[in-house]
Each structure stands twice: as C-alpha cells, then as structure tokens.
Amino acid sequence: VATRPAPRRRADFGRLYRGREGQWSWLAHRVTGVAVILFLFAHVVDTALVGWGPRAYNRVVSVYHNPLIRLLELGLVAAVIYHALNGLRIMIVDFWPRATDRNRQLIYGTTGLFLLSMIPITYLIVKPIVEKYL
Amino acid sequence: MAIESPEIKRPVHRKDSLPTDFPTRAGRQPPAGRGAEFWWWVFMRVSGVVLLFLVNFGFVAVRWQNPFWQTWDWLLLSLAMIHGINGLRAITLDYVHRPGVRAAMNGLFAIVGLVLFTLGTVVVFTFDACKWPGLSAALRASLHC
C-alpha cells in the first residue's frame, strides 16, 4: 500500500529513474500520447474542411490516401492502442496499489496484447497498400 | 539515485518489483488532498476509460445527420482534447522548471486546445451536407436532402 513519499529531489532520480520495464512503458506512454494529441490538432482542422464542401474536403483528405501517410496511419493506430492498453494498466496500479507488485507482469501482458492486436491491424492496413503499389 | 539523502529511507529491493512504499511507485502518485490537481488526476483516468469506448471511424456526411453521432463525436473531441492538453501540461511539470516559461507554454496549449475545440464543436453541430455545392443526385438521395 502506497505511503506518502518523501519529497522527491531531482538529484535522487534525475530524468531517467531506474524503473526498468516501468520506465520504458512510462516513456512509451508519453511519446504515444504526444503523437496522438498532435494528430488530433491536425485532424480537427482537416475535418473542419467539410464546411467548404465535398471538393475541398476530399482534396485534403486524399492526402491520407498516400501510401506513406497510410503507413503513418498505422503508426497512429499503434500509438492509440498502446496508449489505451497501457493506460488501463496505469489505472489498475493506481486504484489497486497491490497490483504494483505484479507491475512487471502487467507490463508484459499489455505489451503482449498490444503486439497481438497489431498483427491483424497491420495486415488490414498494409495489404491494400501492397496490392495497389507493389 | 546518485546522491544518498538521509531523509529517504530506502527499502530493500526485491528481485522482480519495487516495494509499493518506494518513492517511485508504479504510476503517478495521486496528488495530496482534494484540490484541483487531484481532480485532474481523476479526470485523466476516467476520461481515459471513456475514450476507450468512443474511438471509432465513419463517413462524416451521413454520420453527422444523426444527433446521436454528433453528440458522440463531440464527446470524443472534448474528452480527447482536454485529456491531451492536460497530458501536455503534465509533461511541462516534469521538464519545464522556470515558472514563467511553464505558464507561457501551458497558456499556449490551453489556447490551441480551446480554439480547436471551438472549431470542432461548430463543425460537428452546424455541418449540413445537404448545403454542399455541386452535390451529386445519388449522394443527395442517400442523405435524404
């Protein structure tokens, strides 16, 4: 059960605390979160173009049909799924502190679920690109 | 952990996990008390769960004729935007140490978030595909214009 920690000083831990798997999941959560909010900024603007009619909208949205951009889309889906699964793990250890003792196993579990879910998603997104351009 | 400070008593490491009373327990420590920081902490977790159920894709023109999907997408926009902006704010708490710079960055995040939230809200609720110029007869029919 979590007790209130002593005041944390930068000298104690620095920027990289030595949390092993926990540290990397923390980093990945941060990076995927920033990637998703940056996409959301762009996505609000591109969707707002529906107000200018189908021609303007379709022209801008056609950018998303570019094969390179579609690969980025795969990255976006991966970021959202990782952030969602890892977010669930964070909530488990936050609201049920005893789960912290199994944090490492939970991290491997969420990472495994993430990788598994990416198999069909990668297939679905990459297959049309390969069929069209290769 | 380069410098040992006397006031932090370090528990013995177990092999596979950190003890729960270790200063860097897993997850972000809930902020003390019941102030704004605490409710932001709760919000990040609750909105995180709700966002799990909202994420979806669809064709805009047909979708936004339905008030249910308008509300759905607006909720998605609101929660994702607030969750994301607060996430950016949490990052400045870790890396931006000068109060003025931090306030300026967070102010910028807030403004960008508010502008895009307003734009998104207007678009979701005022969009009328039937008013599109040069709409094909087929699309017009499928939209029941």
Image (cartoon, rainbow, N blue to C red):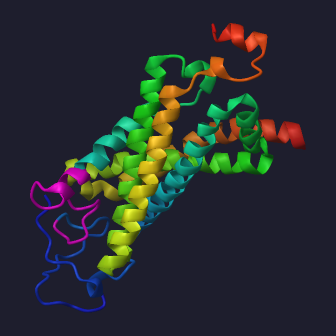
Quadrant placement of the N terminus of chain A: bottom left
- At x 41%, y 50%, the residue is B114
Answer with the quarter of the image where residue B103 lies: bottom left
- At x 55%, y 43%, the residue is A44
Nearest the camera: A75 or A58?
A58
Residue extending farthest to the bottom is B3
Residue B83, horizontal then vertical, whole percent: 37, 49
Total marks placed: 0
Residue A73, horizontal then vertical, whole percent: 66, 46
**In magenta stretch: residue B40:** yes
Q: Which residues are magenta?
A: B21-41
Drawn side of residue B88 relative to residue A61, left or right:
left
Q: Is residue A70 visible?
A: yes
Drawn side of residue A2 relative to residue A84, left or right:
left
Tell me: residue B28, above or below residue A127. below
- At x 37%, y 48%, the residue is B82
**In magenta stretch: residue B37:** yes
Drawn side of residue A122 relative to residue B3, left or right:
right
